[in-house]
């Protein structure tokens, strides 16, 4: 089997998945993938991306082959993220840190780490970053903890529960905290109904409208929807970041909707952000973006860079 599945070429230039999936190599490393690979009517080797089991096995093969992650398991009702898109965020964050002179020895907070623990696994594998993963769901943290233990990463990645679901950084950060950056993939939807409707459209596009009740990437409530949706979440995220202006160099979050990203900018300026960046990310026909901001003055940024050397 050769390389057939062709991903969009607009992924980050360092994203190794720009070249598509070489199923022969993946199956050699992870033989369980073989039963899900088939040749479609165009003569292209692929998997059924509407099948959550197939997607999970593809992810496991990618993590094993390209990122040295030998164990990756969690219940099927937890979110199963697409690896190429997740590592794209990691690469763009690395660019941001490099431009600021703080790429080395970075320590990152993943807000909403989830049971899959995907961002810390990728960020540590590719750049050697240390991570603190936070989540409101204890069961998700327990499952993520098992992944870390099985892969001998507990000294690189730690986990902590946010016990107040209405808060994001309060109870996690304090005056003594110092982190290079945060990252976050916020809940996109305002309700379960909205999430299900979006999934039905997605499955129809994948040619599997009859299976609209099951998400091809799964996902639990706290992973998919939030009262007020993405806009409400990122504004809460930004407001709380302003309570800890010198505890983190860069605060960042994914924002799926352009209008939500635009609505965040004046709020950040009012709260005293000294620099704001909006970084577009392209995946197929989909465009999302990373919004990044810092409250540090130029002098504080210089001091941070000096202590980071």
Image: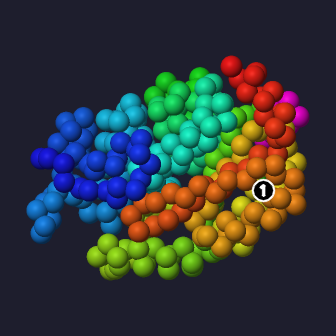
Front residue of 66 and 94: 94
To which quarter of the image does residue 9 belong? bottom left
The residue identified by callout 1 is 238
* 9 left or right, relative to 93: left
* 266 left or right, relative to 18: right
Q: Position of residue 20 (x, y in %)?
A: 28, 50
Q: Position of residue 104 (x, y in %)?
A: 61, 26
Q: Which type of secondary structure does the marked residue at label 1 adopt?
A: helix
Color encoding of the figure: rainbow
* 154 left or right, relative to 46: right
Q: Position of residue 112 (x, y in %)?
A: 64, 50
* 233 left or right, relative to 300: left
Q: Main secondary structure of the magenta part?
A: loop
Question: Circle 1: is it few (<14), some (14-19), or many (20+) Cα within 10 Å?
Answer: many
Q: Position of residue 283 (x, y in %)?
A: 42, 60
Which residue is depicted at the point 36% across and 52% down? 56
Front residue of 19 and 207: 19
Task: Indicate the quadrant containing the C terminus: top left, top right, bottom left or bottom right.
Answer: top right
Q: Is residue 185 visible?
A: no
To which quarter of the image does residue 64 belong? top left
Front residue of 188 and 216: 188
Which residue is depicted at the point 35% across and 79% down? 204
Reply yes or no: does residue 172 show up in magenta. yes
Which residue is depicted at the point 58% across and 49% down? 114
Q: Which residues are magenta?
A: 170-177
Which residue is depicted at the point 41% across and 74% down? 202
Image height of 215 relative to 135, above or below: below
Q: Is residue 296 visible?
A: yes
To which quarter of the image does residue 142 belong? top right
Image height of 37 relative to 133, above or below: below
Image height of 119 relative to 263, above or below: above
């Amino acid at each position: 089997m050769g390389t057939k599945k062709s991903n969009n070429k607009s992924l980050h230039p360092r994203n190794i998945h720009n070249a598509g999936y070489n199923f022969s190599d993946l199956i050699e490393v992870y033989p369980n993938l073989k039963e899900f690979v088939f040749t479609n009517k165009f003569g292209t080797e692929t998997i059924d991306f509407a099948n959550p089991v197939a997607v999970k096995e593809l992810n496991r093969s990618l993590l094993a082959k390209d990122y040295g992650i030998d164990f990756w398991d969690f219940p099927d009702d937890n979110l199963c993220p697409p690896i190429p898109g997740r590592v794209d965020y990691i690469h763009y964050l690395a660019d941001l840190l490099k431009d600021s002179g703080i790429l080395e020895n970075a320590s990152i907070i993943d807000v909403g780490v989830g049971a899959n623990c995907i961002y810390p696994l990728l960020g540590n594998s590719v750049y050697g970053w240390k991570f603190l993963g936070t989540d409101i769901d204890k069961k998700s943290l327990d499952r993520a903890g098992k992944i870390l233990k099985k892969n001998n990463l507990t000294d690189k990645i730690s986990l902590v529960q946010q016990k107040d679901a209405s808060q994001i950084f309060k109870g996690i950060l304090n005056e003594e905290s110092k982190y290079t950056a945060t990252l976050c993939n916020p809940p996109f939807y305002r309700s379960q109904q909205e999430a299900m409707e979006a999934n039905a459209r997605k499955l129809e596009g994948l040619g599997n409208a009859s299976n609209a009740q099951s998400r091809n990437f799964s996902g639990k409530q706290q992973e998919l929807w939030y009262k007020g949706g993405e806009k409400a979440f990122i504004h809460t995220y930004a407001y709380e970041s302003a309570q800890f202006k010198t505890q983190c160099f860069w605060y960042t979050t994914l924002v799926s909707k352009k209008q939500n990203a635009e609505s965040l900018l004046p709020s950040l300026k009012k709260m005293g952000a000294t620099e704001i960046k909006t970084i577009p990310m392209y995946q197929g026909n989909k465009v999302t973006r990373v919004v990044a901001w810092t409250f540090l003055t130029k002098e504080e940024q210089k001091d941070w860079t000096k202590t980071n050397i």
